[in-house]
Image (cartoon, rainbow, N blue to C red):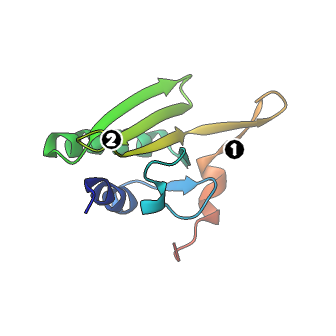
Amino acid sequence: MSQLLTCIDRLKKGAWTFVQLRGKSLGPVDINRGDVDLLGSPESIDRLVKEALCWSKEGLCHVHVRRRKGRKTEFSLFSRDGSERLLFDLWSRLPQIDQGKCSLTFDQCLPLLSQDD
């Protein structure tokens, strides 16, 4: 079993909450695909990044993190041999209309979360 599957499982069960902005629920099909867009609070993003560094220390994966403009974090998990990857864009605020002056926020989307995921 791919160690990235363990990371997916931990990501889904961690002490954070995200809204997946498009596509089906995160799963094995996301390995080696395009990025998964997740909207979360800055605290959830920080918790996930810190926890992923622990996963790296455990030998489950390699982690790459790059912050952009304070509202987007590019977050990547790679298998130890580099053959598999999971790519994420973690958003705390997603610019939408009016040249980005109006943004989608986690607090606005939180009521839309379903317990049936």
Residue sitting farthest toward the front: 83
Marked residue nearer the N-terminal end (2 or 1): 2
Is the residue marked by circle 1 packed among few (<14), some (14-19), or many (20+) residues within 10 Å? Answer: some
Up-down relation of residue 24 to residue 108 (above or below) = below
The residue beneath circle 1 is 104
Residue 74 x/y as whole percent: 48, 33
Question: In this rendering, does residue 104 appear at all?
Answer: yes
Mark number for residue 78?
A: 2
Residue at the image point whose x is 51% and y is 48% from the top? 33
Q: Report the number of discs.
A: 2
Residue at the image point whose x is 61% and y is 51% from the top? 107
Residue at the image point whose x is 57% and y is 71% from the top? 114
User: Please, what secondary structure does the residue beneath circle 1 have?
Assistant: strand
Residue 10 x/y as whole percent: 31, 58
Question: In this rendering, does residue 27 appear at all?
Answer: no
Which mark is in front, 2 or 1? 2
Residue 85 x/y as whole percent: 39, 44
Residue sitting farthest toward the top: 69
| 110 horizontally vs 60: left or right | right
Up-down relation of residue 76 to residue 40 (above or below) = above
The amino acid beneath tag 1 is: Leu
The amino acid beneath tag 2 is: Phe
Q: In which quarter of the image is the N terminus?
A: bottom left
Image-quadrant location for residue 91: top right
* Most foreground residue, 5 or 90: 5
Residue sitting farthest toward the left: 58
Is the residue marked by circle 2 packed among few (<14), some (14-19), or many (20+) residues within 10 Å? Answer: many
| 30 horizontally vs 54: left or right | right
| 13 horizontally vs 30: left or right | left
Mark number for residue 2?
A: none
Residue at the image point whose x is 28% and y is 44% from the top? 79
